[in-house]
Image (tube, helix red, strand yellow):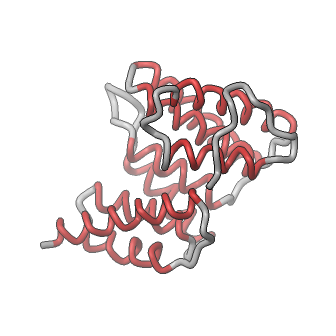
Amino acid sequence: MLTIAPVGARAAPDDLGVLEGRWAVLKYEQADAPDRIARAEALERETAELAGRDPRAETRLLQANALMLTAEFLHSTTSLKKVRAARDLLVETDQVQPNNAAVLSTLGSIYYEVPGWPIAFGDRKKAEDYLRRAIAIDPEGRDTNFFMGDMLMETGRAAQATAYLERALAVASQDSVGARGRRAEVVAALEKAKRKRR
């Protein structure tokens, strides 16, 4: 099983996989750890440093995911600031490196999960636009179908959501903490969508 490196530990410049693994373990296996916020903030700093050296869409996406994970743990007004920073980072990434399905589906998820005005910047139309772009690029992807299905379910379209979530569940994936964690999210969303259809 992957373990989280000590707070402040640094990854090699090309070690995106190590940081992705640490993010997955923290999100899916150690979200209740007493030092989770410190670990998430350390991961934020390391992903920002890595993205500064290697500004590929994949690296910037991980940086955005690290910001959102910290926001998830904080449960405070600071959370929105971090989610906004993640959104801005991904919007900029889409402008410079367009048509990355993972970036687009994550942007879509941010827009449907965040409350709308006047509390925050959530926007269901923007969410759906980003998610449909992602699906057009990667119609059989696990994450693109999961986020589309989850958005449809959360916006009252459980019947449509079920088809996307079933497609996401059918995707073969590697045996990793992240893959198992996402699969569990897909299963939970699909069960919820089916209950809403009854």
Front position in the image: 55 or 170: 170
Residue 37, percent across and down?
52, 26
**The C terminus appears in which quarter of the rendering?**
bottom left
- The residue sitting at the top extreme is 77
* Residue in the image at 65% along x and 36% along y: 89
- The residue sitting at the left extreme is 198
Front position in the image: 1 or 133: 1
Left or right: where does residue 153 sit relative to residue 28?
left
Residue 121, percent across and down?
42, 33
Q: Is residue 85 above or below residue 141?
A: above
Left or right: where does residue 82 sit relative to residue 188?
right
* Residue in the image at 70% along x and 27% along y: 45
Number of numbered discs: 0
Q: Is residue 117 above or below residue 189?
A: above
Residue 58, percent across and down?
72, 51
Left or right: where does residue 149 sit relative to residue 92?
left
Q: Is residue 37 above or below residue 54?
A: above
* Residue in the image at 68% along x and 39% along y: 92
* Residue in the image at 46% along x and 19% along y: 78
Front position in the image: 45 or 95: 45
| Quarter of image, res 179 | bottom right
Residue 7, percent across and down?
67, 27
**The N terminus appears in which quarter of the rendering?**
bottom right
| Quarter of image, res 43 | top right
Left or right: where does residue 59 sit relative to residue 112?
right
